[in-house]
Image: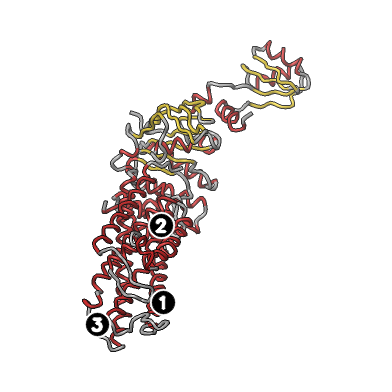
Amino acid sequence: MAAIEINNLVKSFGAVKAVDGVSFTVDAGSVTGYLGPNGAGKTTTLRCLLDLVTPDSGEALVGGRRYSSLPAPVTEVGAVLEATSFHPGRTARNHLRIMCTAAGLPLTRAGEALEQVGLADAADKRVQGFSLGMRQRLALASALLGRPRVYILDEPANGLDPAGIEWLRGFLRHLAHDEGAAVLVSSHVLSEVEQTVDNVVIIAKGRLVRQGTLTELTSNGDTAVRVRTAKPAELAPALEAAGATVEQAGDGVLRVRGLDAEAIGEVALDRRLVLTEVAQERSDLQKVFLDLTEER
Amino acid sequence: MTALVKAELRKLFTTRLWWIMMLVMIVLVAVNLGFLIGLAGVRQNGSAGIPARDTAEWAQLAWSAGSGGAIFTMILGVVLMTSEYRYQTITGTFLTTPRRNHVIVAKLLAGVLVGALFGLVVLVFEAVTVFPAVLLSGGELSLSASRIPQISIGILAMLALYALFGIGLGALVRNQIAGIVGAVVWAYVIEGIFTGIPVLHPIGRWLPGGAAQALMSIDVDTGLGASRWLPAWAGALVLVGYAVVFAVVASATTVRRDIT
């Protein structure tokens, strides 16, 4: 059974279809990146999964059950939704202690979780003095309290500095690969999660666009080389003669498939043609993602 | 449920609001008592006005001043609920306890406990001010004649239940400022008018404030005319009725709502 299971989820807010028939699963021991531009429906999906929002139709299950029917939710699912949901006048430790009390966990878990996310020094400071990065770490600490097996994280890298993002990547990989947890992490910045995730689910305007393992998405697609020359009319047939498929992209640019950059360079050298640009085109995942985020 | 009530109490006592409210409440009650002490026995326009300090009527009137604390427990109740929305801590609360009804019940119980605690503080404060005031002016302190025990029960019930009313109001409006303004307008303006002017008591006695007055059964004519409250038991019933209504409002407005 999948740790997280989303079937045909639909949710509208007024006339806006926030999520429109999304289905995917997340297995234990893997990190799944849930990607899409801002407003694509990522947060709504995650909030349906956590029973904060009631879907119009379809289901979103954790461990085969609805979140609100879990007997001890905090010990099964750790969630990070937004770094802003803290009372500014309360200390970090007290925030976590309130959760511990409500969930029946020992109060000592508060200090341990703060230690784990590197906030031990700020534990007894009021949250109003926290940077966005510190709030994000505190939110993560609250997800760790019950030592859950499933993690649902909404844009957890927001506000983290580069070192913090690097730390988060390692931490998520550790949770999934070493501790066997299922991790679902949303982001609108591909590069944030590209080195972390095993699987990718891409959503845009409420609809699922792509899903698969990271290797599938990056190796299956286009591996074209972009070449620019002053004489494309001479280079194109030469490349085709060498076994490549060539697409004229205009402005002296050729998109070449079937030959790598070195082979293309050798063909050009043989014909004494000057290349002014040789570049490997971006991987499929990035292209798909850019097409969506830039709405070209 | 005990754990959830504890968590709610921890929420309140880990921020500064509760003791600020308690301090302001005591100051307000003190100001009221100051007037009652200063104006005791002074004749207004030839009529009785406030009774003299050595009478049982004065002790009754002074002791009931503690009911003025109800507005503060109501505001506290409003804040207990609305700050969850204002700071979006409601998300974490419902993630920890997805059964929202349990959260609401725990909040209402915590509100009643804190309201009663405020009531106790008011009563202690009254004891150290009213008793000396009566004794120093040569009066005799008779608990039965001044009916202090019954008034005390009324104050405790009123402060505890007004906290609950505040939580219901807060769940309904969710906006903190609107909730606090609503509580003040309700307690000071609407209830103030309908329970302060005896000719309006036929309406006022059905309001929570009037019902609380009935529970305390204050019947001292301070020159505005005789009060026309319900009998004490009916006042208690009306208060319980309001508590149920506010609890249902709090639950109904919270259980199905999307938290976005």
- The answer to whether the residues at label 1 and label 2 have Cβ atoms under 8 Å apart is no
What label sits on residue B141 in the rendered view? 3
Residue A6 appears at what percent x and percent y?
A: 40, 30
Give above or below for B22 relative to B138: above
Q: Secondary structure at mark 2?
A: helix
Q: How many C-alpha atoms fall within 10 Å of the one at disc 1: few (<14), some, or many (≥20)? A: few
What chain does badge 1 belong to?
B
Q: Please state which of the two labelled residues, at mark 3 or mark 2, is closer to the viewer.
A: 3
Instruction: Identify which residue is drawn at 48% across, 38% down.
Output: A43
First in sequence, mark 3 or 2: give its number. 2
Q: Residue at x 53, y 21 (%)?
A: A220
Q: Are marks 3 and 2 on the same chain?
A: yes
Task: Of the two numbered discs 1 and 3 on the same chain, state the one appearing first in sequence.
Answer: 1
Numbered circle sitting on residue A149: none
The residue mark sitting in front, 1 or 2, is 1
Amino acid type shown at disc 3:
Leu
Q: Which residue is mark 1?
A: B31
**A87 left or right of B165 in image:** right
Q: Are marks 1 and 3 in contact (CB under 8 Å)?
A: no
Disc 3 to disc 2, C-alpha distance: 38 Å
Which residue position holds label 2? B78
Q: Nearer the viewer, residue A268 or B42?
A: B42
Relative depth, front residue between A239 and A180: A180
Amino acid under disc 2: Val
| Count of numbered circles on the image | 3
Q: Earlier in the sequence, mark 1 or mark 2?
A: 1
